[in-house]
Image (cartoon, rainbow, N blue to C red):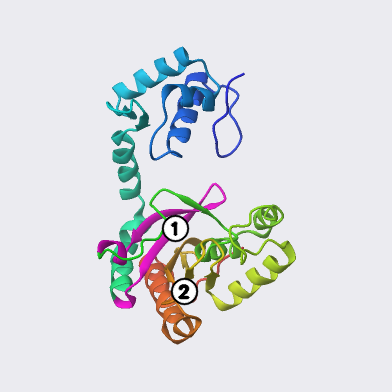
Amino acid sequence: MTPKATTKGKKPTNLVQTIARTALILENLGQYPNGLSLGELSNKVDLPKGTTHRLLTSMAYFDFIRQDQVSKHYHLGFKLVELGNNLLSHIDIRKEARPYLIDLSDDVQETVHLVVLDQNKALYIDKVDLHSRRGGLQMVSRLGSRVPLHCSAVGKVLLANMPESDAELIVQNIKSDRRTKNTITDSSKLKQHLKMIRAKGSAIDNEENEEGVRCVAAPIRNEIGEVVAAMSVSGPTTRITFGKIDDSLKSRVTETAMGISRKLGYSLGTISER
């Protein structure tokens, strides 16, 4: 049986087997920073070693994967970095938002994130990690990674502004996805929480996705008022206190998000149809 890779949308009836297997190999390698041996990878994708090796040889030729000459483990290739950077450079919102993210990070001295909705998760498309550059605490988030909507500030902003029918499907499937003791996994409580987020125009992640880390986020809208992205300030709870959020951070984040929204053509008089 042909293994299935994670896909978005309806599976095509003419799915090419080789492409499906290639996607599955890439997804598995992406989960292991130290790489995988031929045998380990063969087991994970449920393919014979010979078939797996032939696929890897072809993928290595195009630099989609690489093999460490010492450990013989396979890793993702640098061609994917090139393609990923090309994709990110073509996302106008990232280009327009970048100066705002840098200014905010310099101002509040914390890490700033920019995300969009992708496969019902929040996809990190930009990050200004001030403290990692200075040798301090580094957030576990990375460009191209995804975080669940219900337990992150940026995710909750996106979830709160999704069409009701789409949001309902996600809310009803959160019970088993608890990241920390603070993660909201009760659907009724989450619905009330999202209602509050819509009213306030911002969201807080109080150690719901990562222990010791607190975030505050706000929505970014396009020219017709649709929420197309979210941005946040994140940091350790020792610095990102509720007092600091109320005193300055929440207003700075919402102001920055509004600045980016205006850059995308949004105005306060725009009415979004949800």
Q: CA distance from mark 2 to mark 1?
A: 21 Å
Please say whether residue 150 is one of the residues in the magenta stretch.
Answer: no
The residue drawn where x is 37% and y is 66% is 112
The residue drawn where x is 48% and y is 51% is 146
Location of mark 2 (residue): 237
Left/right placement of residue 64 relative to residue 225 reads left
The dot on residue 142 is none
Quadrant where the image shows the N terminus:
top right
The dot on residue 115 is 1
Name the amino acid, label 1.
Answer: Val
- Which segment is the magenta one? 107-133
Quadrant where the image shows the C terminus:
bottom right
Left/right placement of residue 236 relative to residue 5 reads left
Q: Position of residue 199 (x, y in %)?
A: 60, 77
Q: Hey, which quadrant is residue 255 in on the image?
A: bottom left
Of all residues shown, which one is farthest toward the top? 50
The residue drawn where x is 30% and y is 34% is 79
Instruction: Decide: few, some or many residues near mark 1? Use Cα within 10 Å; few <14, some 14-19, many ≥20.
Output: many
For the residue labelled by badge 2, is the local secondary structure a helix, a strand or a loop? loop
